[in-house]
Image (cartoon, grey):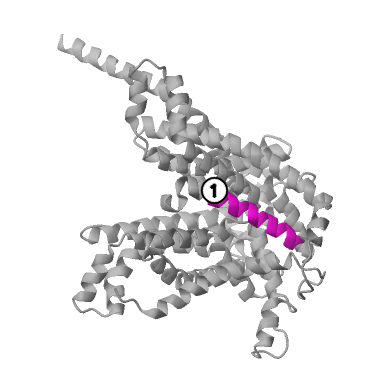
Amino acid sequence: MAARVRRAMRDGMNRQRFSRALRAAPFLGPQSLFLALFVVIPIGLVTTYAFMTRGRFGGVSPEFSLENFTRLLEPVYLNVLFNSIGVAALTTALALVLGYPTAYLIARLPTRWRTVALLMVLLPFWTNFLIRTYAWILLFNNAGWLNQGLEALGWIDGPMNLLYSQPAVVVGLLYMYLPLMILPLYSSIERIDPELEEAATNLGSRPFRVFRTVILPMSVPGMLIGCVFVFVPSMGNFVIPELLGGGKMLLVGNLVRDAFLKARDWPFGASLALVLTIFLVVLLALQSRASKRITEGSPDA
Amino acid sequence: MRRPKLLAVPFWATYIFLYVPIIVVVIMSFNASSNLFVWKGFSLDWYGVLAKDSAVLEGLRNTLIVAGGATVLATVLGTLMAVGIHRYTRGGLIRAYATAPALLPDLLLGIGLLSLFSLLQMSLGLHTVLISHAVFASAFVTAIVLARLANVDPTLEEASQDLGMGAGRTFVRITIPQLAPGIVAGALLAFTLSLDEFVIAYFTAAPQTPTLPIVIYSMVRFGVTPEINALATLLLVVSMTVVIAAQRLTRITEAI
């Protein structure tokens, strides 16, 4: 008797759950399938290709191999990898130096100005990225505005070679990804109660000490996200090294593009993209662990 | 509270850094000279040259087709997904699944989709770019509509169903109007994202039907011309208008 009641209850619940799933299907179904087909399967393909061999006439031949990854260890490619890491790290550091004070001051603006200031950070980010890179070609040119300005100021005698250099690439990447540093920093600083700062100041802490003991520790999660968001896409960008670096300096992104569209060595390109993605995932995981430790450590966050 | 004045230096440096290049491009688009670095007076000549450039016009046409189609697809799929997540799930994993494509490296998505299309032996063309753009744009739509849903009063939907309106009619007459600002903002962002997207289009477009960013890329690679300044200025105006409109609708800056 009891068993029958239990079974009836379970059937009822199953039926309820089934009818709920039926009602949810038209909403969740189409997009879930769309993403499965055009996100999950493509990423799966790239992952699979990374462990296969290149076909004789381009394409992919289904033989398992780790050769793509051992090739990554050849000096030519290691060089590109270290170069990319260096350029991306420099870009990230500069973004932090410019972005942190900016994000902090935005967060402490009156509400009305805060929206304006944030929108002003967002606007360049939403404009065409080729155009934004092109603007720097215009500025960096030997006869360009930067050289003209520096000469007018008497700081330099002849034109400096700005274009097609590593600094040009770093500036281009910084210009591209600076908003991605400012936004997460802003949202983590904005949550810090200004009264905490005031309390610390009233209790006699100097501004730098307030910053080091109150603001900095609580903004670490946003800072880490910002760093990942600047670092990883900087490594994968292939347009800026080409247009501002003159193709002299390759980053990982250039290798991926060339492997896919020029050398038609898809497995090698796939393995590079995979390494880049693993970089992203590992950094994000580290970020989330670090922020969890920080938020659990502080009393009211 | 007293804050060190020195902080204002990087603050203003950031805005100068962000806007000087844009301003230079815009000013030089009105330059009468064909020398990019010498100002010779105001003129609209380069806009005239632009209007007659068949490669640019062709690229624009392709881009509008792609962006229009991708926006419709992304808005419908993304909105349904957001409503479904809000109503029938506790979020968590499915929410991450629906919004993660917005964070995926474009390079990975580009080569992944190229691999898929080639495996399916689909010929590349505007349709493949359209699908590819809808993929990441839909993730943005989902995120924005979800943010809007958090502020929607669920009792209206319940009342509507209690009063005998069916689920379908409730959705069309009650849910959609309540979500409208979020949906429109999502659609606007999907449109600008697609309009400006280069990397994924570069991998998934056919050489015969380049989108506008691909046309710009080949123009810039060949060297700088004043015509690009005019084109850049027009694109800046379009993107900025759309972003400000979307901001007015949903305050995207607060959703971040």
Where residue A270 sits in the image (x, y, percent)? 61, 51
**Residue B129 visible in the snapshot:** no
Give the magenta-colored segment's residue range. B228-245
Q: Residue furthest left?
A: A2
**A88 or B248, nearer to the observer:** B248
Dot 1 crowding, Cα within 10 Å, few <14, some 14–19, many 20+ = some
**Residue B162 visible in the snapshot:** yes
Q: Residue furthest top?
A: A1
**B225 or A163, nearer to the observer:** B225
Q: Assign the magenta stretch its main secondary structure.
A: helix
Which residue is located at x 70 percent, y 45 percent? B63
Determine whether A64 is above or below B178 in the image: below
Q: Is residue B242 within the magenta segment?
A: yes
Which residue is located at x 69 percent, y 55 percent? B234
Where residue A196 sits in the image (x, y, percent)? 24, 67
| Kind of element beneath mark 1 | helix
**B192 or A45, nearer to the observer:** B192
User: Is A104 left or right of B122, judged from the image as shown?
Assistant: left
Where residue B204 sits in the image (x, y, percent)? 68, 45
Which residue corresponds to mark 1? B245
Q: Is residue A167 within the magenta segment?
A: no
User: Is B251 left or right of A167, judged from the image as shown?
Assistant: left
Residue flagged by tag 1: what amino acid is it? Ala
Which residue is located at x 74 percent, y 79 percent? A142
Which residue is located at x 62 percent, y 65 percent? A251
Determine whether B167 is above or below B131 in the image: above
Q: Is the N terminus of chain A in the top left, top right, bottom left or bottom right quadrant?
A: top left
Where residue A163 sits in the image (x, y, percent)? 69, 75
User: Is A97 left or right of A167, judged from the image as shown?
Assistant: left
Which chain's residue wears label 1?
B
The quarter holding residue B116 reads top right
